[in-house]
Amino acid sequence: MTVNRLGLVVHGGRPEAVEAARTVRDWCAEHDVPCTDIDVWQDGGRHSAREEVDSAGDPDLIVTLGGDGTFLRGARLAAADDALVLGIDLGRVGFLTEVPATAVRAALDAVRENRHTVEKRMLLTMRASRRLEVPSDMEVLLRYGRGPLLPPPRVRMDCEVDVDWGIPLHVMALNDIVLEKLSRDRQVSVGVYVSGRLLASYSADALLVATPTGSTAYSFAAGGPVVSPRAEALVFTPVAPHMTFNRSVVTAPDEPVGLRVLERSGPAAVSVDGELRGVLEPGDWIGVYAAPRRLRAVRLGPMDFYGRLRERMNLTDAPAAVADGTPAPLWSVTTPPPRDMAHLSLLTAPEGPSPNP
């Protein structure tokens, strides 16, 4: 592809990220590609994704330098402008970033020379019974020790507002949308609906709806399933529910999940990919569903998701299972699959050095 303009999202607290950013800027200067730092909390406040990418000149490639949190910020920007996003891995236990910092120049060359693929990841969006806002006194409290909050989500003017269906909001989540308690001594009570039908009413610390990508984040920590990022599904997971049924529910991508704050509940916070975006009162509700748009992530080779799962989660083999030694590969990794298996996705041994971690 032709890289006409590049946007940088840098974890400024990591020296290695700052150094890698210099490499990216040098590469841009060599190839006459305008490069802009974005999402930098200018003028003491945060801006919407649309405002940020507009100020950056609508980059067609966004490069993130950091861990999964930095990648999520870059993904929010890329989704707003349908740009490509390339994650440079400077994290510790993440699943989202693509290449190590040592290979950043090779990765940019590969994108410029069309030696890459585009992996599409499912995103979530939402409607709500009212516009989301964060009370001003709460915003002051939450700013302690961190940067300013993102602004409330804007209403989508290209969608119809309806009393029954709610207000469409400019929200794109790559990991999850969470409804959680605000007070430590009081849980939230929430009615959960799938495809418009009541599933159950929960009293819990939080209730979340995750994408397959987000299944290895908060949902995983709450006991949810690991889902392949290539899958198309929504994962509903209750967090510390006070009821017997504490399982996750995996729905089809066209089955929306509704969360209504019940009458005797305390207020509930709405977080999108870990960012507080609003507070709901009893009677308010949100509807979470698959977004029509997909995130477009740069891949420079097949992603070994399950190998990364084994590595990042420190999975070990049962001693009894490996008593006879290391097992041989189940299927050959050196020859093409037979015709009856040609439609399957099987990782093969790499033919040469790869920028993948």
Image (cartoon, rainbow, N blue to C red):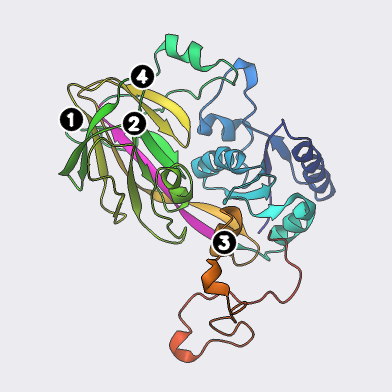
Q: From the image, state whether disc 1 or disc 3 is nearer to you.
A: 3
Q: Earlier in the sequence, mark 4 or mark 1?
A: 1
Residue 54 is inside the magenta segment:
no
| Residue receiving disc 3 | 316
Q: Amino acid at mark 3?
A: Thr
Query: Residue flagged by tag 4: what amino acid is it?
Result: Ser
Which x, y percent locates residue 5? 68, 44
The x and y percentages for residue 52 are 58, 31
Q: Secondary structure at mark 1?
A: loop
State whether residue 156 appears in this view.
no
**How many angstroms separate mark 3 from mark 4 (CA)?**
38 Å
Crowding near the residue tagged with mark 3, few <14, some 14–19, many ≥20 C-alpha atoms within 10 Å: few
Q: Amino acid at mark 2?
A: Asp
Assign the magenta stretch its main secondary structure. Answer: strand
Circles 2 and 1 in contact, beta carbons < 8 Å? no
Asked whether 259 or 119 is in front, the reply is 259
Quarter in which the N terminus is drawn: bottom right
The residue at which mark 1 appears reads as: 163
Give the residue pinned by disc 4.
Answer: 183
Name the spot of residue 293 as percent of width and height, x first: 42, 50
- Amino acid type at circle 1 is Val
Residue lying at 75% horizontally and 73% vertically, measured from the top left: 352
Mark 1: give few (<14), some (14-19) or many (20+) Cα within 10 Å: few
- Magenta stretch? 119-129
As drawn, is 222 to the left or to the right of 147? left
Q: Which residue is mark 2?
A: 205
Q: CA distance from mark 2 to mark 1?
A: 29 Å
